[in-house]
Image (spheres, rainbow, N blue to C red):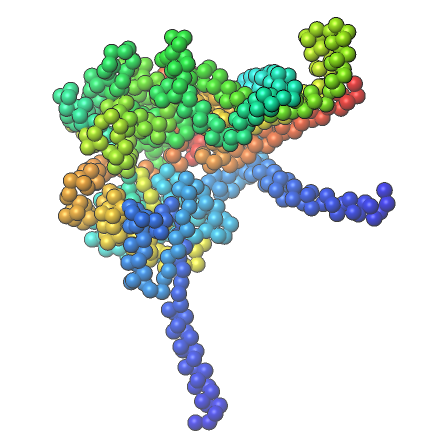
Amino acid sequence: MRTSDARTAYAMFLPAVLIEMILVVAPLCIGFWYSLHNVRFFQIKGFVGWDNYLTILTSSAVLNSLVVTAIFSFAALFFTFAVGFGLALWLKQDCATNTALRAIVLIPYMIAMLVGSMLLKWIYARESGISPLIFGAFGMGEVSILADPNLAMGGLVFNAMWRDAAFAMIMLLAGLKSVPNQIFDAARVDGASKLYIFRRIVLPLLRIPILITVIRLFIHFVNTLTFPLILTGGGPANSTETLVLHMFRLGFQDHVLGPANALAVIIFLANMALVAVLLLLFRKAQKI
Amino acid sequence: MKRFDKFILGAVVAAIGFAGSAAYAQKTVTMWTFLDPAKAGGRDEALAKIIAAFKAKNPNIDIKVEPQVWTTLAEKFVLGHGAGNAPDIGWVNAENLGLVLNSDASADLGPLMTNAWDAARRNDMVSPQALEAVTVKGKVKALPIMAITWVMMYRKDLFDKAGFTAADISTWEGVTKVAKVLTKDNDGDGKIDVYGLGFGLAQERFSATPALFASIQDNGGLFKAGCTPLLDTKATANAIAMQAAWITDSKVTPREALAMTSDDAIEQFTAGKYAMQIIANSRFERIQKEAVGWQGAQLAVAPIPSTVKGKVGPHLMTGWFAAVSESSKNKQDAAKFVDFMTNSESAGLWSVLGGQVPMMKSVAARPEMQKPETANLKQVADLMKASGSYLPGACNWARTLADFNLATQKVVLNKADITAATKEMQKATADRQDVKP
């Protein structure tokens, strides 16, 4: 590359890098610095080294949140991906009905997360929601979804699936659309069954969109705050308090910014690891 | 006179005139509050009148109100101080006093105003202990503007029908007995239509629940010296057990309470689902107006029940305070306005126009406060006078209310025994104070 071309290239991306440095890197560094100090009520009380990290890593509340996050993320990922993939396969053909159905499926995704979670909270409420009508038919009218730890987690997973299945559908539909129809036609002519076509043609050719969708969804579910904050409040009895909700409470409600930032750094590193896994799998998928 | 002498004389006169006008230059004091004096009615209008009255007496001081979202007022005030753009005056709610008092964001109001108060002013306060709550190492860091307390609100119609009076719920034991009788399936469909006692146990948008008051009464407070929590005690364990038993044993409170916020529970009470509930007195008028399926006029107030017969339960005071920013360039003028905003003249406006509980005895004694429509306010003021107490402002206690909820949830769901639950409460609250449990 000529020097003048290089200079032009630098000039083009440097503003974006600068913005990234100011809005992302600088706060990260400040957060890391806070995590090494005792910060109470927005006042820096003294340097404590790795004490905040030790507090976080040995905290039973954080361990509980880690388990909750793992259960929620994996369960939400499974159901969201399964439903999204099912919708993509079902609505693959272009026709008026499918176009309308795709639009309907997209509605929960278009609604703000906070509004969606509040709507579901009202629906789940035993005193004023419709869940007694639904569960009443099965003799479970007295069941309180949000007051039961297992059902509350189920409700949270449903919230995630209800909203984000549309995202999965869009990503996988795009992948499906990129597969030439001639391949499916040839397979059908050769007598391949639908299951065979799905296993031997669709899945291999959709490897990259599937990887992107799975990792993107997983990172989203690990980091989401809105669902547990609004729908369940982390309850009952911390059964739905995720890591991010715990971090939010430490920092913004308890005002203990040292441990909150330590937890934020740990979550950031976990996210970096997830992205590294994505890149590794992406490279492997490209080589195959 | 020579021309030069005339010039000198003119310059001197001009300088004197300029200095004089500088002394009377217009000053602006900015104030962050959740109220908007541009709005009509209630507290907003009361604030507008207070500002107008202050301006009439202090024509060279403008008060510029910048309305803020109430939930972030304290954080913004402290962070604004750090960033150098804090207002001259900031409103802080009692739950967040710890944040302000533990930072260096608020100025000492002692030399600015309270040191000059005479005995009459101090004696006129309904709750003089409010000043102790906001005094840290001899410095008065804020002043109370309006006070709120929790009371037991109950349905007089249901009580009358069952032959009960407020005296029957003067103890927690009495509350349980009355609640059992009032928990009813009115239409015989097998579902409870009215529960005897309501409260919300969620960990977001939470409020004070019965266990908090019982614990405070028997422990003699929520903290001991140095903000050390008093939660890992038999008294707190008994309080949590009492609260959990209402759901699991006597079933006078629905299991759904585990997931209800304080607002959800109040909505249910307004909709006629509960016979009684501990609610902040500030909600009284609204519940009366919005009552569904029952007459709002049947809403009555009783004191917080006691753990001991013959005594009144503690009336925990909360509400709004005004702090002057330490970095304010108009401290004197800001303090002057805060002083005015909290004197008896303004207290009268807050109560009569704003519908707030009288903060001054002289206001409580006014003819306007003896009318039936203000009877509720006077009753609450009397309760505050009798057994009102503020939690130490320097202690970070807001989320301790959620700790009580969490402990109750864990006991109800068998996730922890009571001893473990109270130990966890002690540690959680202590961690927020940077005090070792």
Question: Which quarter of the image is occupied by the N terminus of chain A?
Answer: top right
Question: Which quarter of the image is occupied by the C terminus of chain A?
Answer: top right
Seen from the viewer's position, the closer of residues A283 and A82 is A82
Q: Quadrant of residue A100?
A: top right
User: Is residue B326 among what the camera can see?
Assistant: no
Q: In this view, does A110 lie above or below B146?
A: above
Furthest toward the bottom, the residue is B1
Q: x and y percent of residue A6 in the render? A: 81, 45
Q: In this view, does A262 lie to the left or right of A40?
A: right
Q: In which quarter of the image is residue B313?
A: top left
Q: Which residue is drawn at 46% across and 15% down?
A: A150
Furthest toward the right, the residue is A2
Seen from the viewer's position, the closer of residues B408 and A226 is A226
Q: x and y percent of residue B397 in the render? A: 38, 34
Q: Is residue B72 above or below residue B116?
A: above
Q: In this view, does B281 lie above or below B339?
A: above
Seen from the viewer's position, the closer of residues B165 and B82 is B165
Q: Residue at x 36, y 22 (%)?
A: A128
Q: Residue at x 75, y 13 (%)?
A: A185
Q: x and y percent of residue A157 in the render? A: 52, 19
Q: Which residue is drawn at 45% across and 54% down?
A: B327
User: Is residue A267 among what the camera can see?
Assistant: yes
Q: x and y percent of residue B46 in the render? A: 29, 50
Furthest toward the left, the residue is B163
Number of numbered discs visible in the structure rendering: 0
